[in-house]
Image (tube, helix red, strand yellow):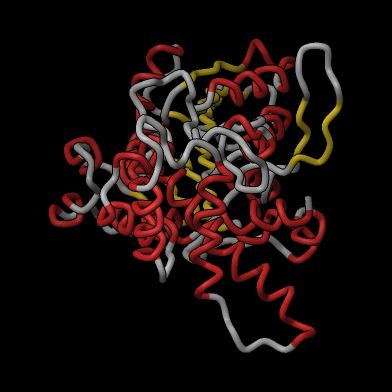
Amino acid sequence: MRLLRSVCSHYGCNEVVLRRLPDRQRRKFYHVPVLIKSVTKLLVSEEMKVPRYFVDATVGCAGHAQKILESDPNIRMLCIDRDPEVLSIATDNLKKFTSRVKFVNGSYADLENHLKVSGFPSEVSGILVDLGVNSLHYDKPERGFSWLRDGPLNMRFDESDSTIDCAADILQTSSEVELTRIFREYGELKCAKEYAKAIVRKRETAAPGSRAFETTFHLRDAIEEVAAKWRPKRLSPSHASKTNRSSLARPITGCFQALRIQVNKELAHVHEGVPVLANHLTPGARLVTIAFHSLEDRPIKQIFRTLAHELKDGQLDSLQCDLSKSLRGKTFRFINKKVVKPCREEVVENPRSRSARLRCLERAK
């Protein structure tokens, strides 16, 4: 469990499961929402018009949503998540707010349509997007997100969407060049080419009609075999065991992260979706983002910079979205130019928050 929490902390697990209690229907998840005081302070203001409409664009198990709803009885909230199973947990956790909450299964990049369907105004008082993976995914072997438990190589946020290639499909059909790109760009691995080669070799030696990579342990073992050849050789006896474990965990976790990002097009959602979210802010409203690794935080930082500098034509082109006409007449400003990180006390209480990075953008007019 300690190793699982460490992996989730570094690679963006979206909720920390504190305890699980048996339920007749299913387990109920309890968690600690990250940077909750900062989120509430930045989003909820007494000067806002009533009623106040908010969007939790990645609701997860609804930790942040619950705190925001508790802060003001005039708040109405639209909760969005790509994972139907996670959304059902959020629905259960927000039962007492039923009259003030709408739930939508989908992507925040489609916010315009979600607002219309839910009867919300086109511009809202505040938006939160908490990126990363829910720890529910890691806790359930059948979802295929964790290399610590054996299960099918799925990794899709929405298991019901058969149009999305699962991780096993990508490993089976991608070329060595494409796999190298995926591992290097999304896993930030130095030996990406070696891992890609190993996967292709395993495919070529698989029995006719079968796949070399069907389960998480199949992939874990293949990556571990390559990583063992590249780990440090000069180690003192006292540090050998610990260093070997660490040197093996890093590439395995990196490969799993890379495949997860590729399967769910996570970075594409950031590039396309964050400008969409900003476009639906009413004057004075704020967009708060929480990212857990630089692959997500870097594009958010760049998008915020672009939006906060008068949106010149050249800058609009860099947003990778078709919002130039809508955004050109709007002005944005940074609330916190420097990223907000959790304090030491929060990290001690909730180790998963260690890698969290919060940014906030406000629509001025």
Q: Toward the viewer: 16 or 40?
A: 16
Q: Toward the viewer: 205 or 298?
A: 205
Picture layout, residue 94 above or below residue 325: above
Q: Position of residue 354 (x, y in %)?
A: 67, 61
Kindly indicate the quadrant of the structure image that contains residue 29.
Answer: top right
Is residue 125 visible to us here? no
* Image quadrant in which the C terminus is located: top left
Q: Position of residue 213 (x, y in %)?
A: 46, 41
Q: Toward the viewer: 327 or 294?
A: 294
Answer with left or right where residue 340 lies relative to residue 191: right
Q: Toward the viewer: 363 or 130?
A: 130
Kindly indicate the quadrant of the structure image that contains residue 18.
Answer: top right
Number of on-image labels:
0
Picture layout, residue 32 above or below residue 185: above
Q: Which residue lies furthest to the left in this view?
A: 313
Is residue 63 visible to us here? yes
Kindly indicate the quadrant of the structure image that contains residue 107.
Answer: top left
Answer with left or right where residue 236 lies relative to residue 121: right
Q: Which residue is drawn at 19% across and 37% down?
A: 322
Q: Residue at x 47, y 64 (%)?
A: 337
Q: Where is residue 244 in the image (x, y as percent from the top left)?
A: 66, 73
Q: Position of residue 325 (x, y in %)?
A: 17, 37
Q: Residue at x 40, y 50 (%)?
A: 202
Q: Residue at x 52, y 52 (%)?
A: 291
